[in-house]
Amino acid sequence: MIKASINLQDLRRRIYCEAKANPSKRFWGMFVHVVKLETLREAYRLAEVNGGAPGADGVTFDQVEQSGLDAFLFDIQADLRNRSYRPTRPRRVEIPKGNGKTRTLSIPTIRDRVVQGALTLILEPVFEADFQTGSFGYRPKRTTHQAITRVAEAIVRYQTTVIDIDLKDFFGSVRHHTLLTKIAERVNDNEVMRLIKLILKSVARTGIAQGSPLSPLLSNIYLNEIDKMLEKAKRYTYGKDRYFHLEYARFADDLVVLVDGHPTWTKLPAQVMKRLRQEFDKLGVEMNREKTKVVCLRNGETFKFLGFQFYRMKTRKGKFAPHFSPAAKSRDKLMTKLSQEFKQMKSWPARMVIETINPIIRGWVNYFRIGHSSSCFSYIKDWVERKVRRHLSKACKRKGVGWERWSKELLYEALGLFNDYRVQYAGPTVTPVRQAT
């Protein structure tokens, strides 16, 4: 779970154990823990670690600390206790998604981030006890790499019929009354419920804000019924061979379901799709019919999940195995971002340019280095090197890229250009149960 101070960590552990042992228990007296100074201080620390731009009030972390952190937290505590706290409407920023579309990111004030973070610290252990194993998004000790590995292992087990689900504006479709009802199934505290309602209404009449500390937990609560349905479907496929013939992985609103490609399970994908539509209709969430599709890996088709392109191909030994590498969109997004950086820094010294782009490249490579990314990494490395060489040439008022003028040792050793493009693919940990088809 989120790492906190010892006392708070112990409280969260006790809440989780009690919630796990009593699935129908409704917790009361939680507001007392939310407004504790220890909880608020930890919520502020987590918000500061995450960083981010200021909200609508323009207040930064430096300004908060210059004015006095203790006074800032005491003021929030007092407002919560006397019921005078009112969240500020978050600042909205449009983030390009490609194809001319944008995603709306909501940026709360630091004050509101602290309150939402405190709520998350206390509520998360309760609902974490209810979440399913196939859910990976923004959960303690769960990562995107684990979700990717789960999908790869399912392909090894010949679950090669893939339902690639795309949700239409999920965060904007969440019904507040439905979400509050789900929260109330586990929380019997009027003050906590009132506080959550205030936060939801500060955004819009429907939907939850992307970018706020509380939103990941709320989205997982809202979609937990989908996970439960898929868990039941998975158990239904458990056969005499002691293997499941259906698997799924969800990261926030990104969901894929993998079904065994054997003729025995031919009708299952349509049945699962029907049940998914029914469950999403109950939630008021619409599946994007144009982008939601059924993919057959045995026919050479591919699908995308969490930035990776998944497909199946033969190994040198003649057996079929899952392969996943950075999707073209993920690669192009990196190149676009780096191109913008080079454009903005065209008059900067090369060393400063490299110091700026290195963290961007390192983060991207560290995310994708678990897959079959060698060829993509080689392409990115050559492309970045060419951009740096052109930057050096323009600084010297020369043409070309200077392949002979500047050695690789100068770029990677003297100037320190990022050079760790090693792939660390470990591979799925399961063994096929029958010959691939």
Image (cartoon, rainbow, N blue to C red):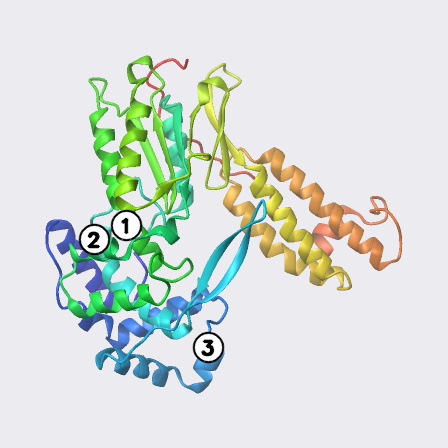
Q: Amino acid at mark 1?
A: Tyr
Looking at the image, residue 195 sits to the left or right of residue 347; the answer is left
153 vs 36, left or right, is right
Decide: marks 3, 2 in contact (CB < 8 A)? no
Tell me, yes or no, whether the two marked residues, 1 and 3, touch with CB atoms within 8 Å.
no
Query: Which image quadrant: the N terminus?
Result: bottom left
Is 373 or 58 nearer to us in this picture?
58
Whether label 2 touches label 1, CB < 8 Å: yes
The amino acid type of the residue labelled 3 equals: Asp
Looking at the image, can residue 220 be seen? Answer: yes
Q: Amino acid at mark 2?
A: Lys
Distance between the alpha carbons at the discs numbered 3 and 2: 32 Å
Q: Which residue is mark 1?
A: 222
Residue that label 3 marks: 57
Badge 2 marks a residue whose secondary structure is helix
Q: Where, by quadrant of the figure, is residue 285 drawn?
A: top left
How far apart are the alpha carbons under marks 2 and 1? 7 Å
For disc 2, the marked residue is 182
Question: Height in image: 340 above or below 280?
Answer: below
